[in-house]
Image (spheres, rainbow, N blue to C red):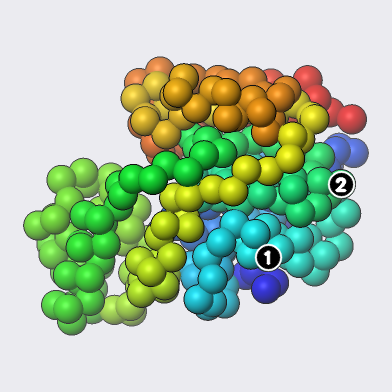
C-alpha cells in the first residue's frame, strides 16, 4: 500500500538522495521528527506512517516483506528513484527488508537500535495491557488516558510516546492486528547480503543490538559499522538526539555518492 507521508524540501539542497524516515512499533511519522528537523537542512525528507499506524491503511499482514513493499510503492508514488533509509526498531527491520526486495532503490542505510534477527521474546505485553485498558475505560482525553496507562507502565516517557497516537478518544494504530501479528514484528527472515556500508546505531543500555547478534548482522550486512550511544536506551534518538545526528551525518558524509 502507498503509505501516508509528509514530504519536506531541503532548505539548502545538495545532490544527494532524499531521506526516508521510518518509525517503530506504536509510532507515527512524527516520531523521528527530531531527525527530520536537522536533516532537512540539506536533504529532502519523507516521513511515513507504516501500515496499521497513523493515517496509513489497515491490513491483517504485518510481515516485513509486506512493509518493504509498502516502502517501495511509497517511493514510486513520490517519484523517488533511490533513497537514504533511516529506520528505528520495527522501521529499521522494514528498511533492511527493502534491501532484499529492491536493493537498487536503497542508497544509504541507517538502522537505529534493532538487529536483523528473530528476537523470539515479548517485550511489549505491558504496553498492550495499557493500551487495552484505555480502550476499555472509554476515556476520551489524553490526560485521562495517561492516568489509566500509568497503572500499567512505570516509564513516563513510554506513556507520553503512546499518547501521541491517542486522538479524539481512539488509538491511531490497529491494536488487534499488532497483537495478532506480533510474532512477525519481533521475528525476521534473513535477507541476502547487502554489500554496501550500513550504519547501526544502538543505545548503550538497550538489549536490542548486542554482541550475540554480531554474526547474524554481519552475514546480512557485511559492511556494517556500529555506533554505540552511551547512556541511552531503545529510544536512543529521543534520549540523545544530538549524538545520533552526529553519527548519522558522519556516515552520510563518508558515503555520499
Where does the image place residue 4, in percent across and percent down from the top left?
Answer: 62, 70
Front-lying residue, 151 or 47: 151
Front-lying residue, 207 or 213: 213
Residue drawn 79% across the image and 29% down it: 196
Where does the image place residue 201, in percent across and percent down from the top left?
Answer: 54, 28
Q: Give the number of the disc on residue 70.
A: 1
Residue drawn 22% across the image and 70% down it: 132
Quadrant the C terminus occupies: top right
Which sits earlier in the primary sequence, circle 2 or circle 1? Answer: 1
- Quarter assignment of residue 86: top right
Q: Circles 2 and 1: CB distance less than 8 Å?
A: no
> Residue beneath label 2, please?
104
Q: Alpha carbon of mark 2 to alpha carbon of mark 1: how far?
A: 16 Å
In the displayed structure, 221 sits above or below 60; it is above
- Quarter assignment of residue 12: top right
Front-lying residue, 143 or 83: 83
In the displayed structure, 252 sits above or below 104; it is above
Q: Is residue 188 left or right of residue 176?
A: right
In the displayed structure, 85 sits above or below 138; it is above
Residue drawn 34% across the image and 53% down it: 161
- Quarter assignment of residue 108: top right
Amino acid at each position: 500500500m502507498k503509505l501516508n507521508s509528509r514530504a519536506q524540501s531541503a532548505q539548502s539542497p545538495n545532490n544527494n538522495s532524499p531521506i526516508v524516515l521510518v518509525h517503530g512499533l506504536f509510532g507515527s511519522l512524527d516520531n523521528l521528527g527530531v531527525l527530520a528537523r536537522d536533516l532537512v537542512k540539506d536533504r529532502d525528507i519523507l516521513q511515513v506512517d507504516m501500515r496499521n499506524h497513523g493515517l496509513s491503511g489497515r491490513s491483517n499482514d504485518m510481515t516485513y516483506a509486506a512493509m518493504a513493499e509498502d516502502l517501495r510503492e511509497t517511493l514510486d508514488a513520490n517519484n523517488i528513484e533511490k533513497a537514504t533509509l533511516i529506520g528505528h526498531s520495527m522501521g529499521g527491520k522494514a528498511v533492511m527488508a527493502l534491501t532484499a526486495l529492491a536493493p537498487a532503490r536503497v542508497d544509504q542505510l541507517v538502522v537505529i537500535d534493532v538487529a536483523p534477527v528473530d528476537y523470539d521474546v515479548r517485550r511489549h505485553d505491558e504496553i498492550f495491557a495499557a493500551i487495552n485498558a484505555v480502550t476499555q475505560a472509554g476515556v476520551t482525553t489524553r490526560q485521562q488516558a495517561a492516568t489509566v496507562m500509568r497503572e500499567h507502565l512505570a516509564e513516563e516517557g513510554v506513556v507520553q510516546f503512546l499518547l501521541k497516537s491517542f486522538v479524539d478518544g481512539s488509538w491511531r494504530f490497529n491494536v488487534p492486528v499488532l497483537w495478532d501479528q506480533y510474532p512477525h514484528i519481533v521475528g525476521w527472515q534473513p535477507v541476502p547480503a547487502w554489500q554496501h556500508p550500513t550504519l547501526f546505531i544502538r543505545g548503550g543500555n538497550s538489549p536490542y543490538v548486542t554482541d550475540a547478534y554480531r554474526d547474524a548482522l554481519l552475514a546480512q550486512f557485511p559492511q556494517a559499522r556500529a555506533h554505540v550511544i552511551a547512556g541511552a536506551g531503545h529510544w536512543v534518538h529521543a534520549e540523545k538526539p544530538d549524538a545520533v545526528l552526529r553519527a548519522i551525518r558522519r556516515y552520510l558524509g563518508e558515503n555520499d555518492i
